[in-house]
Image: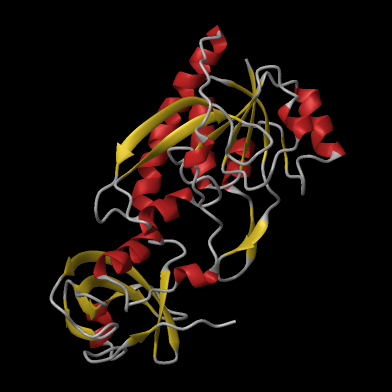
Amino acid sequence: MRIVFVGTPEFAAEILEHLIKNGFNVVGVVTQPDKPRGRGRKVEPTPVKAVAEKHEVPFIQPESINKKEALEFLQSVRPDVIIVASYGKILGEKVLSLPSLGCYNIHPSLLPKYRGASPIQRVLENGEERTGVTIYKMVKELDAGPIALQREISIDPFETFDQLEKRLIELSKEMLIEFLEKLKTGNIELKEQDHSRATYAPMIKKEDLIVDFSKDAESVKNKIRAYDSRPGARAFLGNDEVKLFGVTAIDSSGDEPGLINYIDREGAWIGTGDGKVKVRYIQFPGKKKMTFWEAKNGRLIIEGMRFERRYES
């Protein structure tokens, strides 16, 4: 079975690596163009490109997978199936109709819930207790195709984005091997999604990262862990826009929203709308992440200071 893999970030790269190591015939890779990353804005290869280069798999990085150059590449490698994971761009009908066995997407949510670009973050932000991975046959509409395989896992109350993503990657690896073995034998049963139950996980915007300490402690906790460690939840302390990581506890006893009530080696208690949360790490602009205790000892922060919530254009 000839496989073309389409994806971009680390989530997809680990799945591609697993496919190749398990002996599947990956005949081509499509990934997004390289982009500047990090503080130095240095152009770096996408994680999927790095895996393709390592294993000498032919790859392309088109601005659009639907343009002539990309279509010619796909036709030349003659895929039986196209596997997509976190590619970040829409596949048109010509691409979808190209492989004889179809195009299948690995989506880290329990479809039809959380269709869209940011399911892992939105699941955490909304305080969901369960999520999972869905492999579905792609159609023109976003994340709306019939389901081939779905698995569910529970979410720990203080689990972060990084932790949950890692577990979903491992689940995706297992499921993809199972799915491809079934596809080889024609043993795939597709189940239509219940579109009336669909919810959406839109792309993350800057304002989505801002912590509103006037909300309840559970909501504040969920906001911080949904973006831990990347890109990091934001709050304003004086003139600084800081990042917050490592929420470890909540308490129902009240404090003024945003007030840093107490700092010890384990973190800072910060007031919310109905109690307080304990946060371990803070990152100031241009500095490395540090504990609140280190920030206090470095005279960057003291008890009695207050986080604010505001937007900047």
The vertical placement of 52 against 88, above or below, is above
Residue 91: x percent and y percent?
A: 71, 38
Residue 250: x percent and y percent?
A: 19, 67
- Residue at (44, 41) in percent of width and height: 109
Q: Does residue 195 appear left or right of residue 236 in this picture?
A: right
Q: Is residue 22 visible?
A: no
Where residue 125 sits, quadrant-wise, is bottom left
Q: Is residue 271 visible?
A: yes
The vertical placement of 59 against 165, above or below, is above
Residue 61: x percent and y percent?
A: 73, 44
Question: For the view shown, which residue lies furthest in the right direction?
Answer: 68
- Residue at (71, 51) in percent of width and height: 33
Question: For the view shown, which residue lies furthest in the front direction?
Answer: 196
Residue 18: x percent and y percent?
A: 48, 30
The vertical placement of 124 against 308, above or below, is above
Which colour style is shown? secondary structure
- Quarter in which the C terminus is drawn: bottom right
The vertical placement of 233 against 295, above or below, is above
Query: Closer to the camera, 127 or 210?
Result: 127
Question: For the view shown, which residue lies furthest in the left direction?
Answer: 253
- Residue at (29, 53) in percent of width and height: 159
- Residue at (55, 71) in percent of width and height: 39
User: What count of labels does the image hold?
Assistant: 0
- Quarter in which the N terminus is drawn: top right
Query: Closer to the camera, 84 or 207?
Result: 207
Where residue 5 sits, quadrant-wise, is top right
Q: Does residue 201 appear left or right of residue 170 in this picture?
A: right
